[in-house]
Amino acid sequence: YYFLNEFKDTNSIIKNKNNSVNTIWKNNFINILLLLITITVSALILIFNGSITKNRKRFLAIRVLFLSWILVWLGWVVGGQLSIIHLVNLIKFGMNFGGDMTTFLIEPVIFLLGIITLISLFIWGRALFCGWLCPFGALQELIAIFTRNIGIKQITIPEKIDKKLRYVKYFLLTIIIFGSLLQLNIASYFYNIEPFKTAITLRFIAPYKVVIWASFLLLINLYIERAYCRYLCPLGGGLAVLGKVRLINFLKRKKECGNPCKACNQVCPTGAIENTGNINMKECLGCLDCQVMYNDYEKCPPLVAIRKGIKT
């Protein structure tokens, strides 16, 4: 009799959870629909990037409008910012280190954004989320576009130092994942490296210490574009590692790229283009700036030569 009642109680709890989740999803129907449209548009931009990037001004307008939508609607209105916490919880769930699927389902926008991001890793690597769907990334890039327009000079970090600094995000990722799996207190301190909750979810209405940290990262971004993404973002590091399963190369290169031409290297905001002309896809955010240069008959040296009838 005792076990029968306990079984009934368990079924009742599960049923209540399911009803609660169903209600949450129904109440978020408009946000879910807008998210699916947003994701579809970003995917189409990557699929048809060859055509979209042929007109520099048109692409810049599309980029600014889309990033503004991501920052304001997805970030500040909906709070749809993926975090390293979501990745860690997914790993815990997958490795049976605890966790309930309900904890994922009670946030429909985050759940769908996370699922689409994982699927997209097989196609574009980290480009879809990091380049087009990350609200904090959008905030950084919009600030960078503004600073370029007002003439703030960018700082160039020496290549050797730059390469070493890029390993910091993987170091942070390792500490956070293993610290969380082993339930070490140190992991909770490293979670605070992310400015996402402060700058996006809470819209800077947060304790002054974390506001100062987020503001400091954005200040650095004035002089080193996407500095946080390059060197510190553990979520970006995790997606970069998982993104190695990418099945296609969606960014075009010419035989002149790297030798002798290095025009694309100068416009890449994260320095992902190597001196050989190859693109390091672990560091590439899929912003498509290199493809704008690739298609520009006014600025791409090989295309300029073709336009002027010069043999190469």
Image: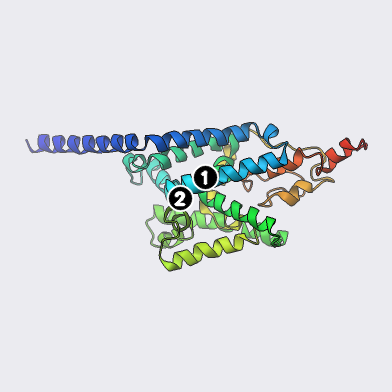
Question: In x, y percent, where is residue 155?
Answer: 70, 62
Q: Is residue 213 visible?
A: yes
Left of 78 or right of it: where is 291?
right
Residue at 55% from the left image edge and 47% from the top image edge: 68
Locate the N terminus by quadrant.
top left
Q: Tally the marks.
A: 2
- In the picture, measured across the screen, residue 52 lies left or right of residue 261, that is left
- Few, some or many residues within 10 Å of mark 2 (<14, 14–19, 20+): some
Q: Where does residue 39 sit, x and y in percent of width and height? A: 51, 36
Q: Relative to residue 54, is residue 150 depicted above or below?
A: below
Q: On the rendered structure, is 196 left or right of 153?
A: left
The residue lying toward the viewer, choosing from 115 and 59, is 59
Q: Is residue 38 above or below residue 163?
A: above
Is residue 279 visible to us here?
no
Q: Secondary structure at mark 2?
A: helix
Q: In the rendering, at what x and y percent does residue 61 appear?
A: 64, 42
Q: Quadrant of the C terminus?
A: top right
Amino acid at dot 2: Trp
Judge by depth and name the residue closer to the eye, 1 or 168: 168
Q: Kindly report the distance in space between the C-alpha atoms of the residues bearing marks 2 and 1.
A: 9 Å
Above-or-below relation of 245 to 89:
above
The tag earlier along the polypeptide, 2 or 1, is 1
**Observer-nearest of 88 and 26:** 26
Look at mark 2 in the image and give the residue it sits on: 76
Position of 289 relative to 152 (above/below):
above
Residue bearing mark 1: 70
Closest to the observer, 245 or 217: 217
**Residue drawn at (40%, 65%), measured in percent from left and top?**
207
Is mark 2 in CB contact (under 8 Å) with mark 1? Answer: no
